[in-house]
Image (tube, grey):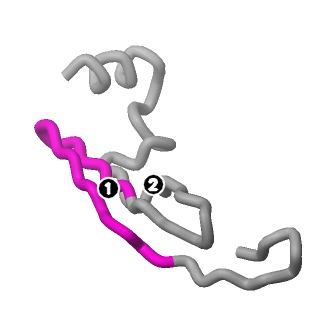
């Protein structure tokens, strides 16, 4: 990333946090660049954009 003064900062992964419940899992990376800290979704199973083939299936999967 780049500061407003034009300085360049490298980005470092500070930590990764994984949470699993049943068949679902997410991994979040904590990144630091200069004075900024950012959370980044590194992995999701099932893919959060592909949960369920229809609304009823999605509701059931989210309740399980």
From this view, report whether residue 46 is shown above or below residue 55.
below
Left or right of 15 on screen, residue 49: right
Q: Residue 51 bears which disc, if any?
A: none
Badge 1 element: strand
The answer to whether marks 2 and 1 mark residues whose Cβ atoms lie closer than 8 Å is yes
Q: Nearer the viewer, residue 62 or 55?
A: 62
Q: Which residues are magenta?
A: 12-28
Instruction: Give the residue drawn at x 44%, y 42%.
Output: 48
In the image, taking residue 31 as reference, residue 29 lies left or right, namely: left
- Considering the whole magenta stretch, tell me its main secondary structure: strand
Residue under label 2: 41
Question: Residue 30 in the image: x percent, y percent?
Answer: 42, 60
- Residue 8 screen position, x and y as percent: 74, 84
Where residue 31 appears, as percent x and y from the top left, is 48, 66
**Where does the C terminus fall, quadrant-wise?**
top left
Task: Report the side of 8 relative to 62 (left or right).
Answer: right
Q: Relative to 23, does residue 32 appear above or below in the rendering?
A: below
Neighbour class for label 2 at 10 Å: few (<14), some, many (≥20)?
Answer: few
Q: Is residue 27 magenta?
A: yes
Residue annotated with mark 1: 27
- Rounded to the nearest whole Å, what is the CA distance between mark 2 and mark 1? 6 Å
**Which tag, 2 or 1, sits closer to the chain's start?**
1
Q: Position of residue 5 (x, y in %)?
A: 88, 75
Identify which residue is drawn at 25% across, 17% down: 63
Question: Residue 9 occupies which quadrant of the picture?
Answer: bottom right
Instruction: Label 2: state its secondary structure.
Output: strand
> Which residue shows up at 43% across the image and 32% down it?
53
Give 35 or 50, whichever is nearer the viewer: 35
């Amino acid at each position: 990333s780049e500061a407003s003064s034009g300085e360049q900062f490298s980005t470092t992964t500070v930590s990764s946090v994984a949470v699993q419940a049943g068949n679902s899992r997410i991994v979040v990376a904590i990144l630091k660049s200069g004075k900024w800290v950012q959370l980044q979704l590194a992995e999701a199973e099932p893919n959060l954009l592909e949960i369920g083939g229809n609304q009823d299936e999605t509701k059931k999967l989210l309740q399980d």
